[in-house]
Image (cartoon, rainbow, N blue to C red):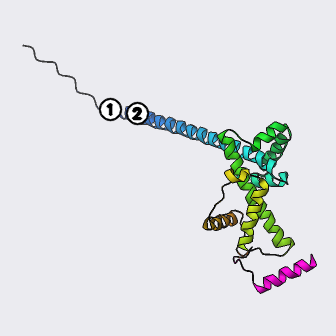
Amino acid sequence: MSRPRQKPETLSQSPLQAQMDLVNEQERLLRAMVKNKKRQLKHATSRETRRMAQVRAVGLRVIALADDASGALYRYLAQHVGPGQQQLEDEHGQLLDRFLDLDGPSVLQLCEPVAQRDKYALRDAIDFMVRWDLVSWLSLQNISKGIAPSVSLVLQQRETIMGRLGRRCDSMARTPNSQAGSYKWLSRWRKQWRLPKGQFGHKDVPTVEEMREKAQWMRNA
């Protein structure tokens, strides 16, 4: 009986072959890393494209809702467009031109949305307009009239602004119903617009000195 043939012993790997294998492995890892970076960049670009599309959709509705359309749009874009001043200017001009090119039914559709994404855009536009109009009103009270409105008066003005924007606010605006929620909303609003503490009074009942200042202003108005 013949003995089974034994496999020849595997020769140890040469240093050159080990180095080539290491280079190949590093190349494979580098290709995988580059591929992953490209995938991440593609996803980030896609997210940014969708985000800017939403910003522009809201911006068009801000134009439709605002009395000072150019100023309100500029302030809205300043909060959502990148830090580049030129990009902000370009977006501002392009959106104004795009709005002016719309016909009557298209403008009406901006504020009477059907698609869900358009409803979200209108909701965000109304939410911004309430905050923006409230900041403008507060600046008028502080600077032009020298009055520091009470918290209750600020909240009352917010309701007035919502009423001016129309019935759409009833179902679209993200505003609180409870008193506690209103105060939280007011606190977030002040932080968002970087209003310093003490910009308006925190007591519903004004002091005697405040009443005297208001009465003096009324006599001089």
| Closer to the camera in the image, 55 or 14 | 55
The stretch drawn in magenta includes residue 204: yes
Q: Are marks 2 and 1 in contact (CB under 8 Å)?
A: yes
Q: Is residue 103 above or below residue 220?
A: above
Kind of residue at badge 1: Gln
* Residue bounds of the magenta highlight: 202-221
Tell me: residue 158, above or below residue 62.
below
Callout 2, which amino acid?
Asp
- Where is residue 175? Give x, y as percent: 66, 58
Point out residue 17 in the picture as x, y percentages from the top left corner: 38, 31
Residue at image position (76%, 46%) is 61
For mark 1, what is the residue? 13
| Residue annotated with mark 2 | 21
Q: Secondary structure at mark 1?
A: loop
Camera-near label (2 vs 1) is: 2
Q: Quadrant of residue 145?
A: bottom right
* Residue 196 visible from this viewpoint: no
